[in-house]
Image: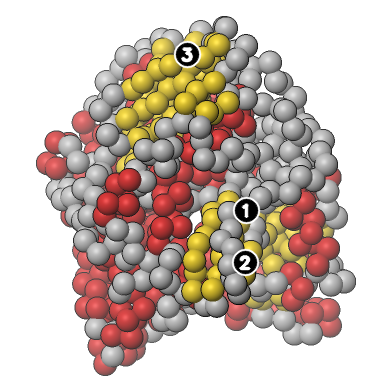
Amino acid sequence: MIRFWNKRLKTGILTEAPDIDEELAALRKSLKDEVKKKFAGSLAIRMVDSGSCNACEAECNALSNPYYDLERLGIYFVASPRHADVMLLSGLMTFNMTPHVLDAYAQIPEPKWVVTLGDCPAMQAPFEKTFAVNAPATEHLPVAHHIPGCPPAPDAIIRGLLAFLKKI
Amino acid sequence: MRLIARYAVELEEAYEVVTVWDEQTDRVRVPKSDPHIETLSRTHPAAIWFERKMHDDFGIIIDNAFDNRPLVHQERFPRGLHPMQKHFTQTAIEPAEYLPYKYEAIGGDGVFEVAVGPIHAGIIEPGHFQFSQAGEDMLHQEVRHFYKYRAVEKMLEGKTLQEAKAIIERISGNESVAYQTAWRDIVLQAAKSELPEANRKYHALLLELERIIHHLTDLGFIPNDAGFGAALAFCSKLSEEARRQMQCLTGHRFGFGAISFDEVQIDTEALRVYLDDLEKEMMFFEEWITDIPSLWDRFDTTGILAHHKALKYDTVGVVARASGVAQDRRDNDFYRTHGFVLHTEKSGDVAARFKQRLAEVKNAIVMMRALLTETTESVVLNEVHGGDYTAYAESSLGELFMNIIVKDGIIERFFVRDPSFMNWQALHLMMPGNIIADFPLINKSCDLSYAGNDL
C-alpha cells in the first residue's frame, strides 16, 4: 500500500478543465444559481442507451476519469430514472428499445428534460432508417437540447451540458 | 470442429444455409416453398442463436431444436414478418399486440426469479438477464438480448463497399478498428489488390492500441465491481491517455475512419515515449494489484468457465483463452515475427480473465514497438469483382467473422458474427455456484459487446 501512496503523491492532481476554463469561470456563477434554484444544488442524469455503438457510453464513463471528474460540477449519473432530473439519450431509438425508453421517461418525476447525446438520436450518424430504427428521438420525446458528435468527446459533453443549463 | 458462424443467404428459388467451421464450410440449399433445416444445437449449443435468428430473418424452420422462441423479434414485433427476405422493403413497422416472452426458469420450493434490464443501473448498454434464485444462490441465468437491433445487415444491402464503410466502423464502438480491418481485407480480396507491408503494420498497430484501450478500461472496472475503486481511478487515467494516443494517430478517439488506403505519416518517436511510459505504469499496476489479498479473494474461483465447456460452446477471445483454449486469429507468422505470444490461463475464473487482459496489454506494448513504422503507402485499388468474401480479425473481445457477397459492385448480403455472439451464450455457465452479487463482477470480467451482438 505504501507504494500506492508514494505513486499518488508523485502523480498529483490530473483534473483539467480542458480549454473550457474561461467559459467555465464565466458560467460558474450563473450555473451555480441555476443548479441551486432548479436542481437543489445538483443535477442528476439518467443515461439511457437506445441503440448506440457504445462509444457514447464509453465517453460518458470517461467523464468520471481523473482528467474530467464531472462530479466536481455538481453533475452526476444516477441509477434510477426516479432519481433523475434529466434523461441523457444516446442511440437510434431501436424498435425493440422504444417502449423501454418511453417507460424510463415516464418514471422521471416532473420537472424533467431530455437531452440527446451523439449523432444517432438526431439521425445524423451514417446509419440509415430501417424498420428497426425509430430515430429521430424528437418524434417520440420532448427533446430540450442536443449534444452533437460521433461520439462527442468528454469535453464536448461537458460543454453541451453547460449549454443546456444555460438554456433552461 | 469449432463452429464459427451459421447464416442464410437468399437465392432465386432457395435459401442457402452456410455453416462455417474452423476446418470447412458447409452449404445446404433449402427450397423457399418449404424451408426446413436440422438443428446443430444438440452437438454445438451455441448454434441455437444462429438458428433462432435465421428463423426470425428468413422464416426458415429449424427441426428438432430445443428452443424455438423468437430471438431478435421481441414482444411487440409483428408476427410472420421476416425482414431479411429480399422482397421486404418497409422502412417502418407498427408495433403488434404484446405477446409475452417465456423465460427459461427453474421451478421448486422457494425458488424465485429476478429480472434485470433491459436498462441497467450504470452507464452501460441495454440487455436483459433473468435469474432463477434459491436465496442468494444463482441456479440459472438466461441472457436475452437484441434490444439494440438496428438491422445493420439489411441497411448495408445495395451499398458499395466504400459506402458501407462508415456504418461498418460504427457497429461496435469498442471494436471499430477490428471491424475496419475485416472490411479492409474484404475490399482487398474484391479488388484483387495487395496491401504494402508498412500499411499492414500500421493497421495492426492501431488494432493493438484499440485492444490496450479496451483492456485498460476493464482492468479498472473489474476491481471496481469488487469494491476496489482505486484501480478504476488508476486504469481510467491510463485508458484516457491511450485514447488520446488514438486521437493523435488517427484524428479520432475511437479510430473511426482510421483504416484507409491513403498514405499516413506517423510520429514514431512520440509513440515510443508513450509506450515506455505505459510499460512502467503497467509494471507498477501489476505489482500493486497482485498484492491485495481481499481483491483476489473475490476474483479467485468466481464465475468459472471450465475448459471443456469453453470448447463445447465454441467460445472465442479473452473468455476462451482464460479457460485454456489456445485460439487467437493473430496466431500467424506476421504477428509472431512482430512479437505476438499466445497467452492462456487455466482457471477460467474472474481472476484468469483479469490476468489474461493484463498479459495481453503487456504483449500489445511489445508488439506495438515492433510494428512502429514511419509512413504508409497510398494504395490504388483495382475494380471491384463480384464474389463471396470472408475476413477475420481478432478484436479486443475475440475472433470477428465477416462475410460480404458482392454482386454487380454492390453488397448483396452482409453478415458479421461478433465475438460476443458466441460468448454471451456461454455466460450462464459461469453462474451456478455463485451468488447474485457476483453477477456484475463475472459479467464485467467478460465485458461483452451488446451492440456488436445485436447488430
Q: Earlier in the sequence, mark 3 or mark 2?
A: 3
Q: In this figure, which residue is indicated by the disc labeled 2? A: B113
Image disc number at residue B29 = 3
Circle 1 crowding by C-alpha within 10 Å: few under 14, some 14–19, many from 20: some
Q: Quadrant of residue B193?
A: top left
Residue at horizontal 74 percent and vertical 69 percent from the top: A81
**Mark 2: secondary structure:** strand
Q: Of all residues shown, which one is farthest toward the right?
A: A110
Q: Earlier in the sequence, mark 3 or mark 1?
A: 3
Proximity of marks 3 and 1: CB atoms separated by less than 8 Å? no
Residue at horizontal 53 percent and vertical 50 percent from the top: B450
Proximity of marks 2 and 1: CB atoms separated by less than 8 Å? yes
Left or right of B426? Residue B436 is right
Q: Which amino acid does the dot numbered 2 rest on?
A: Glu
Whether residue A42 appears in this view of the structure is yes
Image disc number at residue B103 = 1
Q: Of all residues shown, which one is farthest toward the front?
A: B109
Both labels 3 and 1 in a single chain: yes
Q: Where does the N terminus of chain A fall, quadrant-wise? A: bottom left
Judging from the image, mark 3 belongs to the subunit labelled B
Asked if B254 appears above or below B81 in the picture, the reply is below
